[in-house]
Amino acid sequence: MYFTTAMIEDEPTVVVANKDRTKFFTLDYLALELDFVPYTDLLEFIEEHDDEMIEGIRNIIETEEEGNIEPEEMELLPAIPYPLRNVFCMGLNYRDHASETNQDAAELPIYFSKAAFISAGPGDHVSTYSKGKHFADYEVELIVVIGKQAKRVNKEDVEECVFGYAVGQDFSIRDTQTYRKQWHYGKSYDGHFVMGNWIAHKSLYPLPIEVDINCYVNDELRQSSNTRLFICDIPSAINDLTQGVTLYPGDMLMTGTPAGVGVAMKPKYSLKVGDIVKSEVVGLETFENTMVK
């Protein structure tokens, strides 16, 4: 099943889709059918859901012949329009990306955070900040959405703490990131965290998750890899990170990007106004963003 936030009759509403995304149900409708309190906010549902609720929802959306809402009635938003707090990120988690940027693959995970009070979403315009003549770059990533409070989690228990997965685009301003030798600022320009419309529930992608991940610029394939090539896989990363940082329901972890970024091209390629960046995790979601000033 897939979860998202959508505007329906000018109100933000949680929507759940079946695995084929051919039927759509509001959480209000499902709550009435299953006799639980309706949730108008997906973060609230992620925090308070349990396995019984998930199983009940799955039974309805996969067995009922029709959904309770038509696609044209929804205006899809980023699945989590307002992140819980800064988005956690992993750096240099693919060997080919470390190599192309002349950096050693880290023996231990590298973490940083990306300020994201508001998520940009599919179809949104994204600024190159070209008025400042900045170097704008792209990085497609798989996002892990945390489902339960996680502290000092054993690797074998990590999946219990995951809610699901989404597609993310980690736009970066490389000159700020490189010249100032700090990732947080260069990764945190307004509008530079893009999240897909859908969170795929973890039941659709059991660990170890192995999915193709691609990024295109103006229909030219720039990045192409598979998450099985993570240096640090999801259980290892969450086990490691939660030794010192408690993760909460709704927290997000971006898992790193593969080779093919603009700053590593010869000659280097900075995103230009009018460029169309397509982010894809095959089978989960594909979306585009157009670059503007």
Image (cartoon, rainbow, N blue to C red):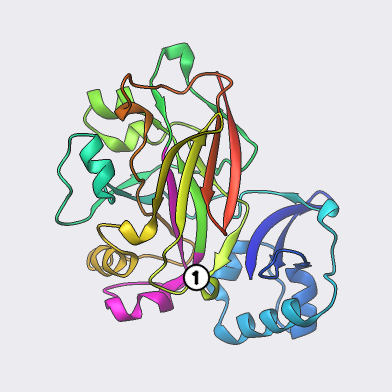
SS of the residue at dot 1?
Answer: loop
- Residue 205 drawn at (x, y percent): 49, 70
Q: Quadrant of the N terminus?
A: bottom right
39 with respect to 22 (left or right) = left
Label 1 CA crowd tier, 10 Å (few <14, some 14–19, many 20+): some
Residue 100 lies, in percent from the top left, at: 25, 36
Q: Which residues are magenta?
A: 139-164
Q: Nearer the viewer, residue 142 or 221?
A: 221
Quick check: can you spot residue 80?
no
Amino acid type for the residue under numbered disc 1: Tyr
Residue at (76% x, 64% y) in the render: 22
Quadrant into which the C terminus falls: top right
In the rendered structure, does residue 273 fall within the stretch colored magenta? no
Relative side of 163 to 15, left or right = left
* Number of disc labels: 1
Name the foreground residue: 159 vs 19: 19
Q: Residue furthest bottom?
A: 52
Residue at coordinates 37% horizontally, 36% vertically from top-left? Answer: 187
- Would residue 30 be visible to someone looking at this image? yes
Question: In the rendered image, which residue does mark 1 sit on?
Answer: 205
Counting from the top left corner in percent of width and height, residue 198 is at 61, 57
Q: Is residue 143 magenta?
A: yes
- Relative height, residue 138 to residue 110 (above, below): above
The quadrant where residue 218 appears: top right
